[in-house]
Amino acid sequence: MKLTWIDLNSWLFQMAGLTILVDPWLVDPMTFYGQPWLFTARHKTPPAFTPATLPPLDCILLSQGLDDHCHVPTLQHLDRTLPVIASPTAAKIVRQLGFQTVISLQPWQTHAIADQLSITAIPGAELQPGQVENGYLLTGLRHHQTVYYEPHSFPAQAASRIGRVDVAIAPAIGQIFPLLGQVIMGPQQTLAMLQALQPQFYLPTTRGDIETSGILPKFLKTVGSLAELQDRIAQTGLNTQFLVPQAGTPIELAIGA
């Protein structure tokens, strides 16, 4: 298994013989709701991949319909014949972009790619009343290697259904948004997730070398740090390896070793 963090929420998962592009933001700028005055982000360092330099892909996986997960300018540069697996809000967007095969997953629905990989939608962030976005549990069907990906918040009530995983990818640094409260989990919540799922490896996401402008960033507050989470893990004696990926550098994991 190889996992490559690109920037912010963007990843390449290479597992079960497949290459999956996750929540890609490869083209600047990124604005929320098409309103630059509200929130705009740019990469300080060009991302390791452009749409033209990506490796051959088997599918695209989108966790949310928000611009930092379902980035329309990036998706417009990608092959419309690629299958897309997405939350309902993201599925609506990519269908409008002309993608031919779009699988919309509600929480706990599963889609299998041939006999190689199953992808199960896990309840994620509720960004608006009644609008629950997705995390995902990816399971290789031959060797049963598992990756849990959640870019916002872990649903503690789902732990028993998820079970133990090999790899967990989730935020380490929380964010508090005006009016919405803490919508991205920080060290305390992430530690609870790790204690529940007992992964062999943990990789942080929702981070990156970006610059922001607009009104919203002025009011955002961060919670915790990578170092704080590392300290919390060490204090509990949790048997999970904390790996901090460098942008564009694949991490090859020996599951079970």
Image (cartoon, helix red, strand yellow):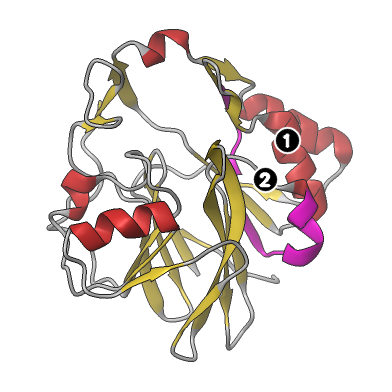
Please give the range of residues in magenta. 157-175
Give x and y (percent) for residue 189.
Answer: 73, 35
Task: Note whether 85 is above or below 179 in the view shown.
Answer: below
Left or right of 169? Residue 114 is left
Pointer 1 local density, CA inside 10 Å: few below 14, some 14–19, many at least 20: many
Give x and y (percent) for residue 177.
Answer: 52, 20
Disc 1 or 2, which lies upstream in sequence?
2
Do residues under tags 1 and 2 come within 8 Å of each other at their CB atoms? yes
Residue 250 visible to the viewer: no
What residue is shown with label 2? 154
Pointer 2 local density, CA inside 10 Å: few below 14, some 14–19, many at least 20: many
What residue is shown with label 1? 189
Disc 2 on helix, strand or loop?
Answer: loop
Instruction: Report if residue 200 lies within the magenta region.
Output: no
Instruction: Report if residue 161 lies within the magenta region.
Output: yes
Image quarter of residue 136: bottom right
Give x and y (percent) for residue 153.
Answer: 62, 40
Left or right of 217? Residue 81 is left
